[in-house]
Image: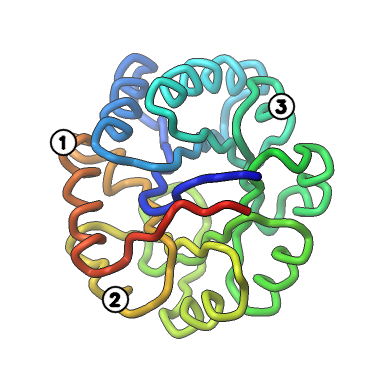
Amino acid sequence: MRKFDPSLYFITDSTNYTEEEFLFRVEQALKGGATLLQLREKEKTTREYIELAEKVHAIAMRYKVPLIIDDRVDVALAVGAEGVHVGASDMPVATARKLMGDGKIVGATAKTVPWARDVYEQGADYLGVGAIYPTTTKVKTVLTSTDTLRDICNAVPIPVGAIGGLNKDNIDVLAGIPIAGICVVSAIMKAECPLTAARELKARAKALGLIGEVHAV
């Protein structure tokens, strides 16, 4: 049984930070209430990715927050991370599930209902759907309407998280949509105080009824 709480899913971006500052910000986010953590590194070598993942995992374990590795099943396995997230151009979900095993979390990106159903049937534990708003990260984004987000939520029985340019001041647009949580990068990563940003975002999401429950899959 894989249990996790996707209500505030924090995705990292180490760009322009020293390792010390990056790790400090990760810890502050967890201290502020992030419930799921994804380490996303597009530029690092495999060795660099593993070395950083080990340090991030040590912090995550202190706060009992699952660590998800973006893209790289090999890195996830190397550091004993709790899961992996695969996008449309990454390894197929079914392959990631086979390699990770049944005890680990496998997340996937989805932008359409057929796509969502397909990755669910392949073994995904949760979906990240977006971008709801334009983002400032290096990841290429295609905007997803809130109607599509709602349709995806209603099409699959696994948790769906909204992602893309979200912050405490614009998540009102998600009210009434049965998402399981909010996924953010810049709203926490680039905040003056990541702890406060995480705390305020979580409070706002809770006030709007967007906070989900712990999921067992």
Q: Secondary structure at mark 1?
A: loop
Density class for disc 1 (Cα within 10 Å; few <14, some 14-19, many ≥20) is few
Horizontally, residue 144 falls left or right of residue 104, namely: left
Q: Residue 77 got which mark?
A: 3
2 or 1: mark nearer the eye: 2
Density class for disc 3 (Cα within 10 Å; few <14, some 14-19, many ≥20) is some
Q: Which residue is mark 1?
A: 192
- Looking at the image, which is closer to me, 28 or 3? 3
Q: Quadrant of the N terminus?
A: top right
Q: Quadrant of residue 59?
A: top left
Q: Secondary structure at mark 2?
A: loop
Q: What amino acid is labelled 3 in the image?
A: Leu
How far apart marks 2 and 3 lie (CA) works out to: 37 Å
Q: Residue 175 got which mark?
A: 2
> Residue at 77% across / 48% down in the picture?
91
Q: What amino acid is labelled 1 in the image?
A: Glu
Q: Are marks 2 and 3 in contact (CB under 8 Å)?
A: no
Horizontally, residue 121 falls left or right of residue 171, namely: right
Residue 102: give x, y in percent of width and height: 75, 43
> Residue at 83% across / 48% down in the picture?
95
> Residue at 52% across / 19% down in the picture?
52
Q: Quadrant of the C terminus?
A: bottom right
Q: What amino acid is labelled 2 in the image?
A: Ala
Residue 8: give x, y in percent of width and height: 36, 50
Residue 202: give x, y in percent of width and height: 25, 52
Density class for disc 2 (Cα within 10 Å; few <14, some 14-19, many ≥20) is some
> Residue at 42% across / 74% down in the picture?
178
1 or 3: mark nearer the eye: 3
- Reply above or below: 49 against 175: above
